[in-house]
Image (spheres, helix red, strand yellow):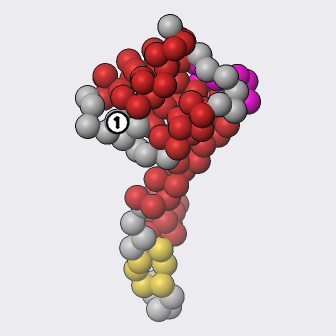
Amino acid sequence: MPELVPQLVDLLRGEMELNVRNAIGQAIGAAGFAPGSDIEQKLFEKLKDPELRNGAALALIMGGNEDAAARTVAMYADFAKRRSISSRTCTSTRSATGRIRTSTEATSIATSEMRRPSAA
């Protein structure tokens, strides 16, 4: 029922339960929408909101054309990458020479030292 899609897009809000948002996204996707339409633009805007991202992505991938699906997957991956980078904590330690090492460097050094055979 494509005529209901605009109302469904407006129902896709953060205060809805996750499973309801995903069901709305699936319903929008099953009904479909025109490429470049206001519906598609609204869904891409909703894709930027972490609360609405999954439902909007479902709608865009299922109901959009190949270009919309590809853009959605690329944006989704970019959001995940940014979240991963921003959630890392960067602690540091000092080496014996006084040089500051990041936690990644320190972990790498510790791992390589654990792999060395012990002196007997």
Q: Residue furthest top?
A: 1
Is residue 114 in the magenta section?
no
Is residue 63 in the magenta section?
yes
Foreground residue, 37 or 103? 37
Q: Please give the name of the residue rendered at 67% of the width and 37% of the height, measured from the top-left corner.
A: 71
- Residue 55: horizontal and vertical position, in percent? 44, 28
Q: Residue furthest bottom?
A: 98
Indicate left or right for 35 with 57 as reference.
right
Q: Does residue 113 appear in this view?
A: no
Q: Please give the name of the residue rendered at 48% of the width and 84% of the height, measured from the top-left corner.
A: 100
Q: Which residue is mark 1?
A: 13
- Residue 74: horizontal and vertical position, in percent? 64, 40
Q: Residue furthest front?
A: 3
Foreground residue, 37 or 66? 37
Q: Quadrant of the C terminus?
A: bottom left
- Residue 116: horizontal and vertical position, in percent? 51, 59
Q: Residues within 10 Å of mark 1 (few under 14, many from 20)?
A: some
- Residue 40: name its quadrant: top right
Element class at badge 1: loop
Q: Please give the name of the residue rendered at 53% of the width and 38% of the height, measured from the top-left corner.
A: 42
Magenta span main SS: helix
Foreground residue, 120 or 41? 41
Eyeballing the image, is 24 above or below 76?
above
Q: Please give the name of the residue rendered at 60% of the width and 34% of the height, measured from the top-left corner.
A: 38
- Residue 94: name its quadrant: bottom left
Three-letter amino acid code of the residue under disc 1: Arg
Q: How many discs mark residues in the rendered view?
A: 1
- The magenta stretch is 61-67
Q: Does residue 10 appear in this view?
A: yes
Eyeballing the image, is 80 above or below 21?
below
- Residue 101: horizontal and vertical position, in percent? 48, 78
